[in-house]
Structures are given as C-alpha cells and as structure tokens.
Amino acid sequence: MKIQKITPIYSAAGERTLAKQLNAETLFRAPFGANSSRFYFLKDFPDFLSGYSHWTSCVLPKSPHLIKWMTDMGDEGERIALETRTYGSVLHYVIAESERADGQPFRFEGEASKWWRDAVRMYMEAHGIGLHLYDTWCANVQNDMFAWQSFKRDCDVQVLAVEFPVHSKEYRIGTPADVIALVQTKEGRKLAAIDIKATTRDVSASRDYQLQLHFIRWAFNQAHGETMQIERTYNWSLMDRAKSPGRYRLKEQVFASPIEGKRTGALTEELFFLYMRLNVLEGYYRPSGEIVTFEDGPDGQAIMLVQKPGEWLKQWQKGGKI
C-alpha cells in the first residue's frame, strides 16, 4: 500500500467558492492500518492523526448485534464485510468523479457509461471480489446514482467539494468529509456536510455516525469559521436495492451530548482523552507521536514496528507524485 495524498475534489461551483475562500490542508494517509484503522499525517505536524473510524471504534462500544453476527458468520462474515466496503468505495468514486469540475458526467447506459463500468471491474479485481457479481454491482450503481440525482433535485443540492480534508491537531483526528454542499432547507440555503453510506440499513440512530458528523462540522468550522460555517449535517443512504429506480434516506444529524449538562465540545474532549488512555494502555500510542503496529513475520511471528510520521513524509517527498 502506498501513501495516499488526500486533497479536495472540487466541483465547478466549488472552484469558484470553496477553493478560493478556504485553505484546505492536505492530509496524507499512512500506508499501514486496515480500512477501519487508518492513520493520517500532515506536512508540518509531528504526530499521526487517527482516522475517524479507528477513533470511534476505540471510544464507543461495538454493537452486540454486530459482534454476534461476525461470530456466527465466521469467514463468510469477513467476505460480506469486504464486499460491502469495496462497493462503498466504488460508489464514493463514481459520485466524486461525476461531481468533479473536470470529471465525467454520469450516464446510465451506452459508451458514456464505460468509465464507471471499468471502475467497478477495477475495484473488484483489486480487492479479489468475484466477477460473477459484476452485473449486479453495475445495476446497483445505476440504482444508487438515480437515488443520488433524485436527492440533488429534491433538495436543490449544489455540491461544492468531495473528499474535503478536515482534522484537529488538538485531538489528533483526521478524516475526509464525503461531501460539502449547499442544500435548500426551510430556513434557506445552508452549507452542509453530507456523509454517504452505501448501505440499505438505517444508520440515522447510530452514535458513531452522529459523532462523526459532529466532528466534521466542528473541525471545519474551527478551521474556517471567519470565512464559512457548516450549518447542517446529514447522513445519506439507500432505502433498498430490491426496487428500481433507487430511493434514498436522508437524516439530519443534530448532535446532542448523552451526558446531561455537557457541551458537545466537552464531550469530544473527554472521548479524545479516553482514546489516548486506551492506546497508551495497549502500547499503541507513544507521547512522541509514534504509533506501534504489528505485521506478520516469518514462522508466524509478529513483528513490532514503530511508525514515525516524519519518516513517512520524507519517503513520500522522495517518491514524488503518487
């Protein structure tokens, strides 16, 4: 896995507004950690930033239903989880490319649909997904993109950026926001952060998704408060894929602290220190900003590696463009 450079993908409207008004700091994804244990770093900061999913998995309890499902399903559960993650990456890519200022418009059929159909195949092959699912995945993309376009029409959505990096050096957390857009509400047009979930189950009540959107809104507004403020946060997901055309589910997330009398900012701070304590106890975090990871070595022996953000940055700079 290579180091990934994460910069905003601007739409034509975003290039005229966000790109000119805001200074989005580039995130680099470190080349270790699983999909749910991502780490990022910045050019001018000595510590790693924990990926959002890793952070929430440390501080929030895992669903007992999910634990039981993974235990009951065994290897089959791992396969389904891989397919779900990979399809999610496909849908995110197709949305990003179709919204990019110099990207390719989404077309359902014909020669103009070749770019996204090729992308589906590429993602499947890269992650070892059986190509017997190719036609199903293409049909799912068509349904899901119909739902996405319906949402844009229904709420008069003007996408400004996709994969917009947000981070907090104070809390050592970083993540790309799926979509930053202007959305029509009852109170007028509002700047919103939209989290896209390529799932048909209702994620609206999930505490980790609520906290994620709260963090994105908080970090974005901390960095750009005098220029631009996110005023709405939404989860966007699919209703079901059994029916065509696709339908979507939209849930506004109004984050409220589960601790009476606690400000949400104070709650975030408490959860951050809980995360730090857990990682110190497990030996994964060092005050110097280093992260300890483990890889499979010869004869099944685990090798402990000390990861330093400065060294990864030098490696990326030496390698030039990715």
Image (cartoon, grey):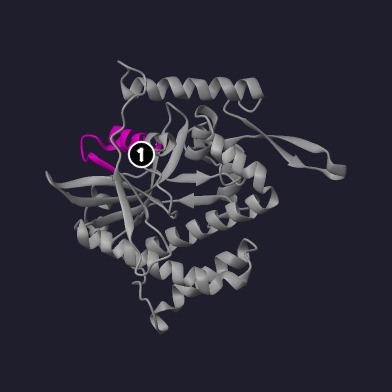
Residue 155: image location, x then y, percent: 20, 56
Which residue corresponds to mark 1? 213
Q: Nearer the viewer, residue 116 or 149?
A: 149
Q: Residue furthest bottom?
A: 111
User: Looking at the image, which residue is at 53% across and 51% down?
Assistant: 4
Q: Is residue 307 left or right of residue 236?
A: right
Q: Nearer the viewer, residue 258 or 232?
A: 258
Magenta stretch: give its range.
Answer: 212-233
- 136 w.r.t. 207: above or below: below
Q: Is residue 37 visible?
A: no
Q: Is residue 195 visible?
A: yes
Tell me the quarter of the picture where residue 253 sits. top left
User: Looking at the image, which residue is at 34% across and 34% down?
Assistant: 214
Residue 39: image location, x then y, percent: 54, 39
Total numbered labels: 1
What amino acid is at disc 1?
Answer: Leu
Task: Decide whether residue 177 is among the magenta residues.
Answer: no
- Secondary structure beneath dot 1 equals helix
Task: Decide whether residue 232 is among the magenta residues.
Answer: yes
Q: Is residue 88 left or right of residue 11?
A: right
Q: Callout 1 environment at 10 Å: few (<14), some (14 to 19), or many (20+)?
A: many
Tell me the quarter of the picture where residue 14 sits. bottom left
Residue 44: image location, x then y, percent: 46, 36
Q: Nearer the viewer, residue 267 or 140?
A: 140
